[in-house]
Image (cartoon, helix red, strand yellow):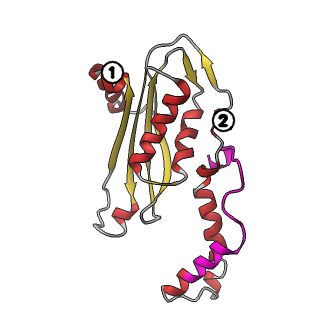
Amino acid sequence: MVDEIERDGEGLDSQGPVESAVRRILQEIGEDPDREGLRGTPDRVHRMYTELTAGYHVDPERLVNGAIFDIDHSEMVVVREITFHSLCEHHLLPFFGTAAVAYIPEGRVIGLSKIPRIVEMYARRLQVQERLTQQVADFLMERLAPKGVAVVLEASHLCAVMRGVRKPGTIMTTSAVLGIFRANDKTRAEFFAHLARPAPSAP
C-alpha cells in the first residue's frame, strides 16, 4: 500500500550521511562493509528506511482526497483486519499486526479505502503502539466529527521476540475510544462484540 499513499516530498536525503552511518555501524560490530555481501547494504538500508518511514511525508488532505460524503447513516461502521507494519522507536525493530477501526457517523462517512490508508500513514513512522492507536482515532475524530471513534490494535513486537525477554507469540493490544464509545458502555460493548465475531471467509 505504500506505493498508493500520496507523498509530499521525497523522504530521506538520498545522499551520503545515511550510508556513512550504516557503514560505521557495520564497522563497529566487527564487519567489513566493503566485502561482497555488504557492499550494497548501506544503500539498501537507506532505501528501506525511506520506504518504512514514508508516513512522515504524507499530505493528509491528499490522502483523504475529498472522500468524505454527506450520508444519512447513524449506525456503527466497523473496518477490521487492517494489516500494518511499523517500527518501534526504541530499538528500530518492526512491530506488526492488525487494526480495527469503528466510528458512528454524524451525517458524514469516509470512503472505505481511506481507513486502511490512514492506519498506514501513521504506521510508517517510528512509533510506539499506544501513540499509533491514538493518532488514528484522533485523525478520524477531527476529520469526520462523528459521534465517536474506537480503534484497537493487536501487534507482535520483534523487540520482545528477538532481544530482551525473548518471548515469541506475545501480543500487545491497545485501544483508543472517543466520544460516545467512551461515554456509553453499550456502544463500547457493541464494538467489542463485532471484534469477537469470526471474520468472513473469502468466497
Identify the disc placed on residue 126: none
Amino acid type for the residue under numbered disc 1? Thr
Range of the magenta residues? 1-24
> Which residue is disc 1 drawn over?
187
Q: Position of residue 71 (x, y in %)?
A: 58, 13
Say what secondary structure mark 2 lies in: helix
User: Mark 2, mark 1: which one is toward the viewer?
Assistant: 2
- Residue 203 appears in the picture as rendered: no
- Residue 185 appears in the picture as rendered: yes
90 sits left or right of 171 in the view: right
The residue lying at 63 percent from left, 79 percent from top is 20
Residue 66 against residue 5 in the figure, above or below: above
Residue 70 against residue 54 in the figure, above or below: above
59 sits left or right of 175 in the view: right
Counting residues from the N terminus, which is met first, the one under dot 2 or under dot 1?
2
Q: Position of residue 111 (x, y in %)?
A: 60, 27
81 sits left or right of 177 in the view: right
Q: Position of residue 152 (x, y in %)?
A: 38, 38
The residue lying at 42 percent from left, 63 percent from top is 90
Residue 162 against residue 64 in the figure, above or below: below
Say what secondary structure mark 1 lies in: helix
The residue lying at 31 percent from left, 69 percent from top is 164
Magenta region includes residue 135: no
Amino acid type for the residue under numbered disc 2? Glu
Gap in angstroms between the C-alphas marked 2 and 1 = 30 Å
Which quarter of the figure has residue 39? Answer: bottom right
Residue 112 against residue 39 in the figure, above or below: above
Magenta region includes residue 21: yes
> Which residue is disc 2 drawn over?
61
Label 1 Cα neighbours within 10 Å, binned few <14 / some 14-19 / many ≥20: some
Q: Position of residue 98 (x, y in %)?
A: 44, 44
